[in-house]
Structure formats: structure tokens, C-alpha cells
Amino acid sequence: MPLFLFFSYNLRYYSAFKTHKSDHTSFLKFYQLLQKMRSDRFKYDDESDQKVPTLSGMVEDRIIKAMENEKKNPRRYLFLKIGLVALTLVISFFWLSYAPDGLLGKMDAVGYAVCHRIEARSFHLGDRAIPLCARCSGMQLGALLAFVYQLQWGRKAKLPPLKILMVFGLFFIAFGVDGVNSYLHFFPNAPHLYEPNNTLRLLTGTGLGLGIGAVLYPVFNQTLWTDWEDQAALGSWKRLFALIGLGLLLDVIILSENVLFLYPLAVLSGLTVLFVLGICYTMIILLLFKKENEFTTVRSAWVPLLAGLTVAILQTYLIDIVRFNWTGTWGGFPL
């Protein structure tokens, strides 16, 4: 039976290859698909013969269809790609020209679009506040940390188990409680639970950020990749506690306010805003155009990734314009 399946399925692959052999890009896609399908097929055949055609129907048909669509209108796709790159460059140029001077100035413009940037609630590099407040800095850097931390386990696309999600739920509650308590201090006569401070803002922000990254990573994998794995990257207490430990270490470094660490982290926090927004918009674009699960490499997925980043930059630019025209300053909201 396995030998029969090998010859019958490879005969079908050879026919598909003959159809697309003139297109070098399609050949590379076909070759990657063939290698994956061969390895997965023998694995599935050892477990159950009934799973072989199911895998073929899920993966092969979708990829071959994408190859056919690209082959039908090669010039149209080329013009769309050129147009996207041009649009990205134009939007980026206008936004960078509008933003304040210097690298930190550009990051200030990013933070300006998503954060109040109140100086008293931010950490400082000398006498200037970093691009994001303490809470937003923790949230963005925590999200990036969780996302990067899970990369070592590949394209795992299953959400963490409920017990781990409940821990992140507690982090979310702590974030909300501390945020409301901090907000009440804008009103002198309003009751509050305790005196807020930047340390608590950073810790609760980082906790929420870890939860965002823990959810964003598997959802992104499940939306983008053809060969995503139905397993959780954060599937054990050991991995969760290691991530939390890294988050605490990150906060200790930020609290030191050592310029050697705080400057790159300040820049990284601003870039993370664009990264997270870009990832979210990429998923939305894939769903709108029904292109989810059609990619096997970052190189093959550069178009939706760049489109998502472009929308993120455009959003930042538009909010910057509205807020600056409203307030007349790049600084934070006055207390």
C-alpha cells in the first residue's frame, strides 16, 4: 500500500509540475510543497491510511490554485507589487518628514500616535522622556519579548492551554485595576486604592504585553502559514515561568534607567508599535482577500507583510497629524 501511494501521488505531482514548469517561482513553490508533502505523507500513512488524502486535499489544492492564479496574471501581480513598494516609500517619506528630527524624534512620533506621553509617567534619558510612558513601554516590549520567545518552537499555532491563559487573564485584570487607579489621580477628590507609581505601571504593562504576544504569535501563524502546527508554543508551566522571568529581568533593566540599556529599549519600544500593528493589519488583509494559509516562507509572504506595515505607518502618520494640529506640541498631555 505505501509503495502504491508513492507512485500514484508522485504521478499527480509530476502532472502539476509540467503545468507550471515554465514559471521559476512556481517551480520553487512546487518543490517546497513536494518535500513537505512527501515527509508528512509517510508519517500520516504510518498512523492511518485514511489521513493521506485528507492532507493532500488541505495543502496541495490550495497551493496549486495559488500557483495557477499567479501564472494567469503575472504582469498584474508585478504591477501590484511595484505599486505597493512605491506607496510604502511615499507614505514613509511623508511621515518621516513630518516627525521630529533624530531617531528618538521619529520614535516619539510613533508613541505620539498611541500613548499620552505624560512626562511624569515616563522614564527619562537625561532630561527627555522616552517615546512611550512606563505602562506602554512595558506593554510593547513585553509583547515583543513573548513573540520572539516563541520563535524557538517554530510555527506553533495553538493557543496556550486554559490554565496558562488564566494567568495572562490575571495580568490583564492587574493592568486594568492599576490603570483605573492611576487615572483617578487626575481628579483630586476621587477615591483611589493606592498611590500609583511608574514601577507598578511598568510591571502591569509588561504583564499585559506578555499576554498579547502569547496570543498574537499563534494566531499569526495560523493565519499566514500553510504548514502551521496544531500545538502550543507556551504549552507548559516551565515555558511560562521562563517567559515571566525574562519579563521581570527586562523590567529591572528598564528601572535602572541606565542609558546604555534604556536608549536601545526606547527605540525598540517605538519600533514594536509598528511591528504589532503591522502584524495585526497583515492578518486583516489576508482575511479580507482570502489569502490566509497560502505561504511557506517569509520571502513568499513579503507582499501582505509589507502591506500590513504600510497601513500601520499610515495610521501613525494620520493620528500624528490630527493630534499635533489639536495640541500644537509633540509633548505629552499636560497633567
Image (cartoon, rainbow, N blue to C red):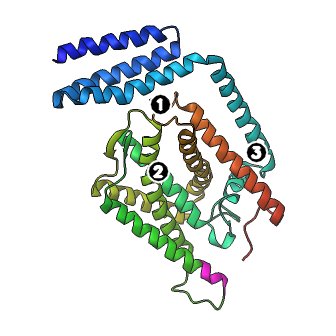
x%, y% of residue 208? Answer: 48, 63
Residue 124 painted magenta? no
Residue occupying image coordinates x 38% and y 56%:
243
Look at discs 2 and 3 and give the one toward the viewer: 2
Q: Mark 2 points at which residue?
A: 216
Q: Which amino acid does label 1 sit on?
A: Phe
Residue 207 pos. (x, y %): 45, 64
Picture quarter with the C terminus: bottom right
What span is colored magenta in the figure?
Answer: 183-187
- 126 lies above or below 40: below
Neighbours of disc 2 within 10 Å: few (<14), some (14-19), many (20+): many
Q: Distance between the residues labelled 1 and 3?
A: 31 Å
Task: State the residue at coordinates (34%, 54%).
Answer: 160
> What x and y, as percent, mark residue 314?
71, 46
Determine the image quadrant of residue 333.
bottom right
Residue 295 got which mark? 1
